[in-house]
Image (cartoon, rainbow, N blue to C red):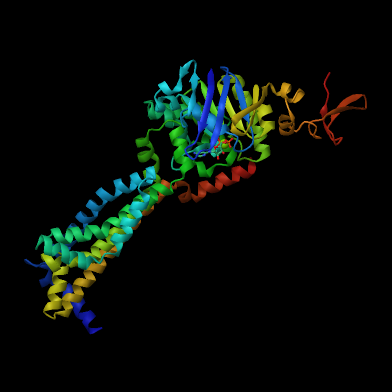
Amino acid sequence: MIEFDAVHKEYPDGTVAVERFSLIVPSHRVVALVGSSGSGKTTLLRMVNRMVEPSSGTVSIDGVDVRSMDRVKLRRSIGYVLQAGGLLPHRTVADNVATVPVLEGRSRRQARADALGLLERVGLDTALADRYPAQLSGGQQQRVGVARALAADPNILLMDEPFGAVDPIVRDQLQAEMRALQADIGKTIVFVTHDIDEAFALGDEVVVLRTGAEIAQRGAPAEILANPADDFVSDFVGAGTAQRTLRIREVDGRSVVVDGDDRPTGVLER
Amino acid sequence: MNLLIEAVQWLLDPVNWQGENALGMRILEHLGFSAVVVLVAAAIGIPVGTLIGHTGRGRGAIIAITGGARALPTLGLLTIFGLWLGIGLEAPFLALLVLALPPVLAGAYAGVESVDRATVGAARAIGLTERQILTGVELPLAAPVIIGGLRSAALQVISTATLAAYISDTGLGRPLFTGMKTQQYDMMLGASILVALLALIVELCFQLVQSAATRRAEPHNGHQHRAHSGARERIAA
Ligand SMILES: Nc1ncnc2c1ncn2[C@@H]1O[C@H](COP(=O)(O)OP(=O)(O)O)[C@@H](O)[C@H]1O
Ligand SMILES: [Mg+2]
């Protein structure tokens, strides 16, 4: 469980990125923080692994204030995935995945063997293990990033717009794989994105943020869609747009779901 | 042209490679002295430059200092240090150090600074210590630029180290100045040719080391074949 308690962050230049933010991220759940660029999502995420220190308030993990933990140990115990993977360009895929386990004293052999297993786990051919990041596609790099984050078997994963740099088709695929993976591993995940569809696709709970990380609404995706709290949320989720206003049309005895422009999106199963 | 042939003849004359004034000895002196200067410049310049590149602190100061030092004429410095320290290796050592430090410092800080901050940030976020970031990420990625700084320092030192003989009678500057004073132009030119050759050889060695470092920093660029098969899969994916 991750708890943000009245967390406030003002950067040295006076920018207030986060204003008294409180939230509980329950264990084994995915909480998606969604908001437009500059709303403070990255700042929130980086306060969990102490890449950013709050100006006031506390962030705690399972009841322990992160400030009482050693930075390096804390970071090694948390998986961190960021855009384009943040991989080390001069190390092979396997070495990238094995970075933290090796630093933690695992033998290179063992760490490499584990890395191969993790690559399979995230849907990568182990033949890629000896390639360098620049030799992989964006989607492949992203998968390596996830494999690396899982390498030390952390309880917590922090993901900062991890799929933001890949094309929409690969992104959909990565999201589906992420859901399947999470069903299996059940980590506590904070997932940051500016894409509401991605937040709905991955979050057990979605937190919609305004500037200054002010919570506009939080709830299950269906709850937010059903009852947007205000105009801001309504705009943000695109309530009322053609894509979100679905109707049923009877065609040959079956119920076809169509959107606001009358374009079919699927068939209703009964 | 005649002079050039005479210089080559002087160089090839076995007499000049024997005895107390053997050229081999002068070459060793020249290289050894240059190497000490460059090593000391590296021992000071690489840690300081790396630290500045890593922390981003002291950048302005270092640019001003190295810029200023570059403008100082080595011969003038040598004279000043010579008047202060007297005959011996100390004065040329200091003068050459002032010559060698700016490129080494600049290479180290520019190299480290040029490493993608996102890569460094990611390394920190997954739990590398600052020391591990420096040795495992920044230095290997900056190595080609750092070695480039050493390379230009070494070249300048080797060509300028002839001035050492002006005060301390050592290295290839010795036959060069003797030749000049006694109007033995074959000797003077022969010694100059040797200095140029040494510089060229050292330059080649540095080139090899630098490209090895580049292959390590950007391993994918050397592997055309693999890169292509990667591209193919990307299209297939
Ligand atoms: N290191 C920093 N120094 C000053 N301002 C910053 C820094 N990092 C982020 N900010 C500012 O804080 C606000 C929130 O940034 P961020 O947390 O990155 O938002 P998001 O991830 O939602 O785009 C923005 O206005 C941004 O410009
Ligand atoms: Mg961000």
Q: Nearer the viewer, residue B193 or B14?
A: B193
> As drawn, which residue projects farthest toward the top?
A63
In which quadrant of the rendered image does the C terminus of chain B lie?
top right
The quarter of the rendering in which ligand 1 is drawn is top right
Which residue is pictured at 40% across the width and 33% down the height? B128
Q: Vertical placement of B198 versus A134: above or below?
A: below
Residue A234 is at least partly visible in this image: yes
Q: Is residue A214 left or right of residue B161?
A: right
Q: Nearer the viewer, residue A124 or A161?
A: A161
Which residue is pictured at 12% across the width and 74% down the height? B178
The picture places residue A134, in percent across and down from the top left corner, at 51, 44
Q: Vertical placement of B14 versus B67: above or below?
A: below
Which residue is pictured at 19% across the width and 58% down the height? B94
Which residue is pictured at 26% across the width and 68% down the height? B196
- Numbered marks: total: 0
Q: Is residue B60 left or right of residue B224?
A: left
Quadrant of res A202:
top right
Q: Vertical placement of B25 versus B16: above or below?
A: above
The picture places residue A80, in percent across and down from the top left corner, at 51, 30
Q: Nearer the viewer, residue A180 or A203?
A: A203
Q: Vertical placement of A195 versus B164: above or below?
A: above
In which quadrant of the rendered image does the N terminus of chain B lie?
bottom left
The picture places residue B190, in percent across and down from the top left corner, at 19, 74
The picture places residue A156, in percent across and down from the top left corner, at 52, 23
